[in-house]
């Protein structure tokens, strides 16, 4: 059975760039946009054109550059925003306007000081106006995670009638539980007339560490687009991490969902974004962290050396990491030492390994990690006949 495609909407250059201190220049954004296009993302959210002349210019230049992906610009449900976004996107091969408004009780009461009916009218007017410029219009219901499902369904139905092609259901505050977020998608699938005319989209924030889980729950219940960023960067605790959702769908084939991402480019893309934004990737970050395929305890190392799959659920090469690493520490066993010694040129017999291991433990107690250069010193210190092992 052929798999259903989940569209990957990358918002590294818009929501991702809202991280304090991570503002990028247009030329840096262009390098990232080109890489995202190569990676195979379906949509690149290039910026919020009305927010500043710099952002406007970035969206213009990205629109000219990108060859395959749809290029999208964010707006509020405000005519001027929409006009400026349309102007910025005019060179895009496939342009999309992403417009919307807050729909939760808190946004309606406190931010807009108005009523649900007025918000609904503004949403429809924004989508209708955006439709006069581009065919592809995505509507976001900001704070949909905390919006009452009945009103959310009503507004979704109205904007579909006005021509929205994609319905973004953001968990803006990262509050939803996966079950709740999945149920919201299911509710919309079952209660919005005309829902077959639009794609439901997951846009999850990571305030409780649930952005990835919520996005996956969303696609299991009928959404077919995930909005995400490289390395999960974004305001506060960040957005859904692109590399995580892509690899979850790849590693769980029974979900029958797939993306167009070339996963072998994930690691290098992560490194590039981290370097351009000056945002280090935490070592234990899933998929792209430096420890994601590193094994340091003796029991795990022995298992991985015998058969990688004992402790790894994906092949590092699938995400562009050359191989798993066996880290030598005081917790490592003989199997790991023999493996690493062989890599630097020493084929040790069992007796020689015992002697070298004894010396290794003394070194390892003094140092946090034993590097290749240390292995040579340890072999020398163990006083075995080097000629016989090299
Ligand atoms: O988190 C959010 O609600 C957003 C919207 C502006 C799409 O980023
Ligand atoms: Zn967001």
Image (tube, helix red, strand yellow):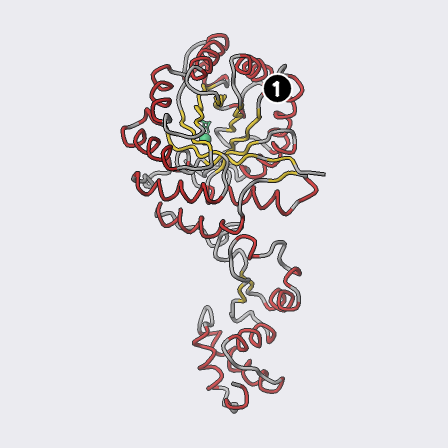
Cβ of mark 1 under 8 Å from ligand 1: the answer is: no
> Residue 232's x, y, as percent?
47, 42
Q: Relative to 140, does residue 65 appear above or below in the rendering?
A: below
Q: Relative to 28, does residue 72 appear above or below in the rendering?
A: above
Q: Residue at x 55, y 39 (%)?
A: 212
Q: Which residue is mark 1?
A: 195
Q: Residue furthest left?
A: 53
Q: Quadrant of residue 24?
A: top left
Q: Nearer the viewer, residue 127 or 102?
A: 127
Picture quarter with the N terminus = top right
Q: Nearer the viewer, residue 327 or 129?
A: 129
Secondary element at tag 1:
helix
User: Dot 1: few (<14), some (14–19), or many (≥20) neighbours within 10 Å?
Assistant: many
> Residue 275's x, y, as percent?
36, 50
Side of 383 relative to 186 (left or right): left
Q: Residue at x 35, y 31 (%)?
A: 59
Side of 205 relative to 16 (left or right): right
> Residue 251's x, y, as percent?
63, 47
Total of numbered circles in the picture?
Answer: 1
Side of 123 relative to 307 (left or right): left
Q: Relative to 130, does residue 239 appear above or below in the rendering?
A: below
Q: Residue at x 50, y 89 (%)?
A: 386
Q: Nearer the viewer, residue 161 or 277?
A: 161
Q: Relative to 230, does residue 144 appear above or below in the rendering?
A: above
Q: Can you tell me which quadrant of the image ligand 1 is in?
A: top left
> Residue 332's x, y, as percent?
56, 71
Q: Quadrant of residue 337?
A: bottom right
Side of 69 relative to 64 (left or right): right
Q: Residue furthest right?
A: 1
Q: Quadrant of residue 114?
A: top left
């Amino acid at each position: 059975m052929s798999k259903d495609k989940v569209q990957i909407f990358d918002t590294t250059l818009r929501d991702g760039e809202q991280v304090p201190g991570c503002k990028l220049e247009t030329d840096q954004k262009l390098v990232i946009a080109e890489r995202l296009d190569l990676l195979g993302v379906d949509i690149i959210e290039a910026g919020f054109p009305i927010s500043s002349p710099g952002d406007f210019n970035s969206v213009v230049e990205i629109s000219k550059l990108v060859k395959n992906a749809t290029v999208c610009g964010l707006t509020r449900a405000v005519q001027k925003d929409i006009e400026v976004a349309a102007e910025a996107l005019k060179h895009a091969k496939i342009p999309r306007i992403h417009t919307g408004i807050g729909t939760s009780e808190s946004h309606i009461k406190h931010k807009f000081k108005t009523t649900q009916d007025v918000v609904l009218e503004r949403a429809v007017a924004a989508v209708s106006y955006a439709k006069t410029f581009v065919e592809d219009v995505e509507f976001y219901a900001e704070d949909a995670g905390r919006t009452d499902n009945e009103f959310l369904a009503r507004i979704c139905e109205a904007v579909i009638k006005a021509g929205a092609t994609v319905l973004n259901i953001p968990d803006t505050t990262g509050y939803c539980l996966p079950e709740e977020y999945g149920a919201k998608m299911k509710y919309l699938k079952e209660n919005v007339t005309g829902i077959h005319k639009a794609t439901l989209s997951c846009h999850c924030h990571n305030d409780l560490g649930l952005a990835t889980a919520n996005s996956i729950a969303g696609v299991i219940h009928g959404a077919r687009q995930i909005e995400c960023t490289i390395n999960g960067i974004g305001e506060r605790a960040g957005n859904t991490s692109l590399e995580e959702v892509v690899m979850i769908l790849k590693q769980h084939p029974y979900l029958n969902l797939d993306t167009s991402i070339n996963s072998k480019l994930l690691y290098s893309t992560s490194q590039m974004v981290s370097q351009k934004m000056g945002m280090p990737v935490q070592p234990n970050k899933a998929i792209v962290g430096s420890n994601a395929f590193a094994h340091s305890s003796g029991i795990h190392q022995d298992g991985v050396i015998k058969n990688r799959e004992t402790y790894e659920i994906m092949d590092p090469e699938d995400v562009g990491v050359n191989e798993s690493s066996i880290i030598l520490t005081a917790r490592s066993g003989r199997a790991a030492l023999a493996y690493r010694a062989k890599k630097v040129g020493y084929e040790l017999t069992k007796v020689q390994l015992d002697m070298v291991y004894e010396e290794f433990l003394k070194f390892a107690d003094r140092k946090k990690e034993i590097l290749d250069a240390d292995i040579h010193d340890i072999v020398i210190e163990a006083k075995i006949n080097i000629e016989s092992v090299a």
